[in-house]
């Protein structure tokens, strides 16, 4: 746990330099715009600890799989987000001495990420080895208003002497992934040009042939006036640079402005790339730095208007939740259905930047409530587009008849992961993908996705489940053998309750959806049946048989659902009785010890209860929570939020708050000692869920929003906004009141603490709270 | 399946060259002497398909582990047998043209491995590209009589012209392992010398610092007379060579003789290595090629006298069983307790040349019956010496109090393997190691190993089992969760019957052995307790509790032992109903499909029944065999022998013969398309077991040999010899008679078909067989 950043409601501030934490800071000070992003590295040369990282969404490399022992069915490669051309660098020489921040004395240092406007600023006063004192300010942003655009404004002022200064502006495509399996270079050269005020490097990924043009238009000014400078251009393979030299007087400010544009063959023909990049650069330069920055700030303001959460009385918590919302929004903007949310966003390479079930189980609820419904719909379209690959993937494992198994980890629909117990067995991901379709339809009320696309996905998944279960003569039930549930501390188990439940639900939801389409649009229904060769009655009858006869392990005496068959054969120890030196288990215990223990990595039975809460009584939920929570070590960042939501639901606000704390500042305080690899972007959506669905008690039932808010004792109050269909609703709770505001749109009826109220536009609905016994 | 080798009772013969099978032939024509060995590569240059392989027993390199996804507890490295200096090469130039066998016309070609004498001979007539016809004969052996010695005799006769000939004799340490994980070089240079008639290369392994001196003394003669030749010496890093040039007339024979000596720092101080090698070379050269060859042949004759198996009426079967016996004897001679039997012997790199449980479960019975008891005892000592490492290994996984988990794969006692489901879970290997102690004691009657060493191993293992089980409140039994049985087509199962049974037996055998030592030698007993801090009563009482209460899954309705909990939940299909295109499963099915199926890779429940046969009635055995055999795909070469033995035991000779056929010619016919990687050396012991314990029905009970022989219909008869304590007994069976001969030693009583008879020296005991109905 580290606490070197200042607490601030809207900003992340490092007000003195922490060299040993620099890689952590680089992760935390990352900026992006959904289309590209970069870690918060210095513009100047820095020979200390740094991890270069500049990423372009959707541009990946199929890195040859590394494996100890090959298993049939493993993928040939792991698709990796690429470390792409470095465009942020501005190297500086003063009187011919290169400024290396690692070798300077830092008289002043402050870097600030302003989340409200999406700008990263660094102000420094440094003393070089030769004694020159310089004031430096750099500011940059990746524009979410114009998502092929970024800009940097970089200024230097000599404080104690006149100096000759050389500024080297460049774009360098000679970058490698730190996580390359075979230390290969992933890029090929296409072209590089440096002339006038423009630099451009076009590179192409090996194997996948994505082309990326990274261009920059620069202006250098002294005291805000453009001045003639001596300029040398330099190009080399995948490199284009300009060295600009001038003399400045003590107290004069040299400013270099770099307008950057990144365009790719995803959006342009190869032949058009260069022009597209040049046009974009000229547009930016014309517009000017401040206008671009303001556009970006305005776009961010718009996001905050819809998605902000305010917490009263706890600045650290306020900062944390905004950091999480900021990261999610700069990682994925929902404009492009080919993109998705990598576990680390644009903050690092780890996990290859690929898509996991995190998107469906955690991120969809966030985007549903905080953005236009096209955002979540695009995330669903991503999977729809991958359906043929999911069918191929299932076929590779021996399934047929259009059965679809979505990959555990993917970039383009093909499986990337290669641990058999996960790749082949953690098949509950299929269920989460089906659940997201249901969730989207429930939340938005929009059934067109379901009928036009979702049903095909559901049928592929149901076909998979049908072939994945088998009839046990022994049990007189359908069983599902050899799976791994969300709790990855159990592998290859039989009849994981969560997975079986999901499968059962998938069948039913598919059948229900088929029936409703049949009623609504028989032509489309028949077209669908034809398209995917579905013999409706024959297949659905089989599915119904599984629904009726699937084995769902329970423990009658304890009155709980059983995580899997045989779970109660394990030695039953509670987390609280584990000596502290044993934690975290994944670092302190051997894998077999973890597997044999009863300890649960992340919500498993409880994930099922979370998904299908209304199917269970509060008593059932409480019994299961009271059984599983004490056995759960939460060694996945995706776990505590589910426990927080359930705890809040069953009235255990203290436990909910405890769980909330475990994720909210995960990266800001580097709790897991791994933020230097990048932030835990997808799990940030879970933090948001903890507040909105946990403390806010928000649910959607029968086309209506429900709120059952509770206020943690530690806070004075909180409020959040959610989009719901045409409305933006704000819920505020403090020690005395619950206040509901209907910010946009027509009147809307919502349930507040199980009572239906109508929220009128521009009129707050206020519920006075009885003072709780606890507070006396 | 390939059948390009001639069938011959004593020889392996390839009488025309099969270039595309050359790597297979190299494996089959391997020679070794327990101390070192090599694949059957050509002496001459060969630019075709070849895998260089020259190995020195016990000299290994810890190759950095390659892994896709690290799991805590994995070893840092995989110890690999090293491809060591090439000493066999003799390159030839004729009139300055280098002879490359791949580019010559082969007018005649025959290579022959004479298993009776342990010599490899190749005769060829070749026509070079320039039209010179040469008769070539090469012969070589690795002496089991003097195990630092090998020799090559190589002769060339020009047939159609006088020629100038250059013979290049060299030792080349610049060799690499084909299976290097990171393409590293494993050797460092120490020294190389070439002067007079002597060459020597001393190299040292990286990291492990084994030094190996490979020396050679050469003689060149024309028509068997030493002649003065022009000799150039050449050394380079890890290379020493001599180029010898002379003119010879048509019809004259040039002979080069290479006496080779290989000595290592395992047996000499580094400072003595060179001298030791030189002394050995001089001794060899003095003795001369023919005397050395005769010594080797004599030593082999001695081995055959004790271990031969004769099969009448089936030359292919005769050749196969001798090939198996030959391989086992040239791989391991039992002189050095630091050595063991790699799965491929000296025939290839695969599986790293390390030790597996194959040694205890399969090889020990072979060596017990065919060699001095010190051989098997040395194999046991190997594990005793590794006990501290086994305790360390267990500690790494979280066990304590001297619990020992032997590695799955090892070279020096440390675990090398890194698949969690095997490394951490295939713990039945511990049981096989305990069983080998029992087997040795039962067979030899020698209890000194047990009391002096074995008990410590047994206690370490029992301590491990005790910590590895846990009490299931649910079952009111001890359970063992998360294991992999011998059937590796099931992973991470609960309560594998075989493993639980072995654990139960281990406890009892340890307690019994402790009790008997206590009776026999209370001082040694107390010393032992002290040494390993055993609180006898306390610990053994706990073990007794597990013995009495361990869960052994059974299926009452079927009357069988259940491979593991939940096995009957699987869809029950039989191998015979599997379409042929699905086999072998390990190539045709994805790993998850294999795991979910009921198909069994290799004997599992039946392995337990084999070990503890006398605990079960024939009816029980038959019921289990009839259940499991039809579900077993035998995709391990270790499987059919166990089924053969049990089939013979329950009277199903046809099935026994079918099973026997699956292993006997596994390599000679390259059934699995993988002999090019090396021979399946350890499973060859299983083939031997199929005959002796299967058809021969040999058992040891209460210090007496039992034979219940049956004759497969396809054979006229067979006979085998076994050592039993001071005796060599030969059993012969033909269509009419069973004949027992007591070849050496005093009178001995044995059971033949359950009747006790006394075998007198030099007097055959004959039992006339009733003609069986089957034969009419």
Image (tube, coloured by chain):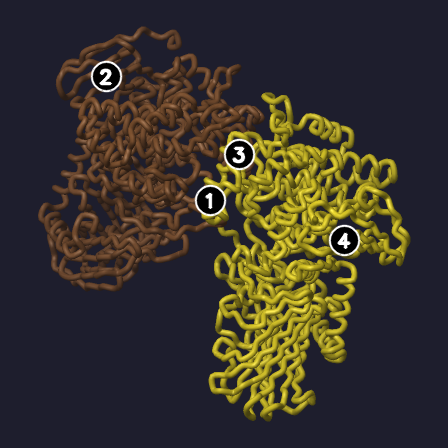
Chain colours: A brown, B yellow
Asked if labels 3 and 4 touch by Cβ distance under 8 angstroms, the answer is no
Q: Is residue B688 left or right of residue A173?
A: right
Nearer-N-terminus badge (2/3): 3
Nearer the viewer's eye, disc 3 or disc 1? 1
Please say whether residue A99 is visible from this viewpoint.
no
Specify the quadrant of the image occupied by residue A613. Answer: top left
> Which class describes the residues within 10 Å of circle 2: few (<14), some (14-19), or many (20+)?
some
Res A704 label: 2
Q: CA distance from mark 2 to mark 3?
A: 42 Å
Task: Report the residue marked by disc 4.
Answer: B733
Which residue is at 21% across, 50% downward? A264
Task: Report the residue marked by disc 1.
Answer: B579
Task: Report the residue marked by disc 3.
Answer: A595
Q: In this rendering, is residue A507 above or below B425?
A: above
Percent of width and height locating residue B611: 70, 41
Q: Secondary structure at mark 3?
A: helix
Percent of width and height locating residue A56: 26, 47
> Which class describes the residues within 10 Å of circle 3: few (<14), some (14-19), or many (20+)?
some
């Amino acid at each position: 746990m580290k606490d070197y950043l200042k607490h601030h409601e809207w900003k992340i501030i490092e007000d003195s330099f922490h060299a040993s934490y620099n890689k952590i800071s680089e992760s935390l000070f990352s900026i992006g715009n959904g289309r590209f992003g970069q870690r918060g590295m210095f513009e100047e040369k820095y020979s200390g600890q740094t991890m270069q990282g500049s990423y372009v969404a959707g541009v990946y490399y199929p890195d040859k799989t590394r494996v100890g022992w090959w298993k049939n069915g493993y993928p040939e490669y792991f698709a990796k987000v690429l470390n792409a051309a470095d465009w942020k660098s501005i190297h500086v020489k003063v009187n011919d001495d290169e400024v290396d921040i690692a070798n300077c004395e830092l008289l002043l240092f402050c870097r600030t990420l302003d989340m409200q406007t999406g700008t990263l600023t660094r102000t420094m006063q440094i003393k070089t080895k030769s004694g020159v004192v310089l004031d430096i300010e750099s500011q940059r942003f990746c524009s979410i208003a114009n998502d092929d655009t970024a800009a940097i404004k970089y200024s230097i002022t000599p404080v104690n002497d006149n100096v000759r200064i050389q500024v080297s502006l460049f774009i360098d495509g000679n970058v490698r992934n730190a996580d390359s399996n075979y230390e290969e270079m992933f890029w090929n050269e296409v072209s590089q040009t440096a002339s006038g005020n423009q630099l451009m490097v076009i590179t192409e990924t090996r194997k996948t042939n994505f082309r990326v043009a990274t261009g920059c238009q620069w202006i250098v000014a002294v005291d805000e006036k453009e001045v003639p400078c001596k300029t040398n251009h330099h190009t080399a393979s995948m490199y284009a640079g300009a060295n600009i030299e001038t003399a400045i007087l003590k107290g004069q400010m040299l400013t270099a402005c770099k307008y950057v544009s990144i365009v790719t063959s995803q959006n342009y023909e190869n032949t058009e790339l260069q022009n597209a990049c040049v046009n974009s650069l000229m547009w930016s330069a014309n517009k000017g730095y401040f206008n671009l920055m303001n556009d970006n700030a305005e776009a961010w303001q718009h996001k905050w208007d819809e998605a902000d959460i305010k917490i009263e009385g706890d600045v650290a918590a306020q900062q944390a939740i905004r950091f999480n919302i900021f990261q999610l929004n700069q990682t994925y903007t929902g404009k492009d259905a080919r993109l998705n949310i990598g576990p680390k966003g644009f903050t690092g390479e780890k996990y290859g930047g690929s898509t996991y079930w995190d998107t469906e189980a955690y991120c969809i609820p966030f985007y549903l409530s905080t953005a236009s419904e096209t955002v979540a719909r695009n995330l669903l379209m991503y999977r729809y587009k991958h359906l043929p690959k999911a069918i191929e993937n299932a076929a590779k494992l021996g399934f047929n008849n259009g059965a679809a198994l979505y990959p555990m980890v993917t970039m383009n629909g093909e499986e990337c992961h290669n641990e058999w117990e996960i790749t082949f067995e953690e098949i509950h991901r299929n269920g989460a993908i089906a659940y997201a379709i249901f969730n989207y339809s429930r939340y938005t009320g929009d059934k067109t996705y379901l009928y036009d696309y979702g049903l095909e996905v559901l049928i592929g998944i149901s076909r998979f489940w049908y072939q994945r279960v088998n009839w046990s003569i022994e049990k007189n039930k359908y069983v599902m053998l050899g799976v791994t549930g969300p709790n990855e501390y159990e592998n290859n188990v039989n009849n994981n309750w969560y997975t079986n439940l999901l499968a059962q639900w998938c069948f039913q939801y598919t059948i229900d959806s088929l029936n409703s389409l049949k009623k609504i649009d028989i032509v489309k229904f028949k077209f669908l049946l034809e398209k995917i060769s579905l013999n409706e009655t024959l297949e659905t009858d089989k599915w119904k048989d599984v629904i009726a006869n699937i084995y769902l392990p329970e423990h009658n005496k304890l009155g709980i659902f059983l995580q899997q068959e045989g779970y109660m054969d394990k030695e039953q120890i509670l987390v609280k009785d584990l000596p502290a030196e044993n934690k975290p288990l994944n670092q302190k215990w051997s894998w077999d010890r973890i597997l044999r223990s009863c300890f649960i990595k992340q919500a498993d039975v409880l994930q099922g209860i979370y998904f299908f809460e209304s199917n269970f009584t509060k008593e059932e939920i409480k019994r299961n929570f009271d059984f599983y929570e004490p056995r759960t070590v939460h060694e996945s960042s995706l776990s505590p939020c589910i426990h927080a939501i359930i705890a809040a639901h069953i009235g255990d606000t203290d436990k909910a708050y405890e769980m909330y704390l475990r994720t909210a500042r995960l990266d800001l305080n580097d709790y897991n000692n791994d933020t230097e690899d990048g932030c835990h972007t997808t799990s940030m959506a879970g933090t948001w869920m903890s507040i909105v669905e946990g403390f806010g008690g928000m649910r959607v039932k029968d086309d209506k929003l429900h709120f059952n808010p509770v206020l943690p004792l530690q806070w004075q109050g909180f409020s959040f906004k959610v989009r719901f269909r045409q409305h933006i609703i704000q819920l505020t709770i403090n020690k005395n009141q619950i206040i509901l505001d209907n910010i946009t749109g027509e009147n809307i009826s919502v349930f507040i603490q199980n009572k239906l109220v109508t929220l009128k536009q521009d009129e707050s609905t206020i519920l006075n709270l009885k003072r709780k016994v606890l507070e006396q």
